Image (cartoon, grey):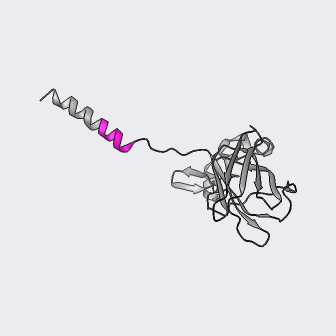
Amino acid sequence: MSRTRPLWILCTALVLLLICGRAPAQSPTGQISGTVQDSSGAIIPEANVTLTNQDTGSVRTIASSPSGEFVFTALSPGTYTVKVEKSGFRTYEKKSIILSVSQRSALGNIQLAMGQVSQTVEVTAQGEAVNTESADAIGSLSTLQVTDLGVKGRVVMQLLRVLPGVNTLTVVTWGASSDTDLAGSWSEG
């Protein structure tokens, strides 16, 4: 009986490992998506969509789906250029798309104008990206923000308070209170 017990434990552990497999981890990658349309709003299937990482020079190309949609997944943070081409339409190009960690950047409806293939419409202005596809809120601080923000004592938790959804609590003997609570701020002294 003593010889079969270690073998039983080993077999059970092996079966559990095979059943459970590897648990997927969160990835720091993001995605860029959009829909290709013509100037009247009709979808354009099978358009060639090229994504170029401006930092590394790597290029990925896909075709838009029958519903005109495209999604580039597993993208590392960086600055990207999206180029959309379809025969009979002007080429569309959008540069300097900044992708942060785990960000989902939705470009929305990309409208291709009728024209010759040699004509290109280039979009260079970039406003703040608004995620319309999910409610994910990602907060990150740039190097400029870290160096220029005036934070009392350069305490990291105070610096993080500028991010959306971050709040700190002061713990006092009678419980936790907000930093804006007068009783909590009096007890710190």
Q: Is residue 130 magenta?
A: no
For the point 67% across and 55% down, the residue is 63
Q: List x then y, in percent, for residue 28.
A: 61, 44
> Could you tell me how many numbered marks the image carries?
0
For the point 80% across and 54% down, the residue is 94
85 to the left or right of 66: right
The answer to whether residue 104 of the structure is visible from this angle is no
Q: List x then y, in percent, for residue 36.
A: 72, 62
123 shown above or below 41: above
Q: List x then y, in percent, for residue 6.
A: 21, 29
Q: Which residues are magenta?
A: 14-25
Residue at the outermost right position: 119
Residue at the outermost bottom position: 40
Which quarter of the rendered picture does the N terminus lie within? Answer: top left
62 to the left or right of 19: right
The answer to whether residue 12 of the structure is visible from this angle is yes
Of 87 and 12, the residue lying toward us: 87
Of 34 and 98, the residue lying toward us: 34
Residue at the outermost top position: 3
Q: Quadrant of residue 151?
A: top right
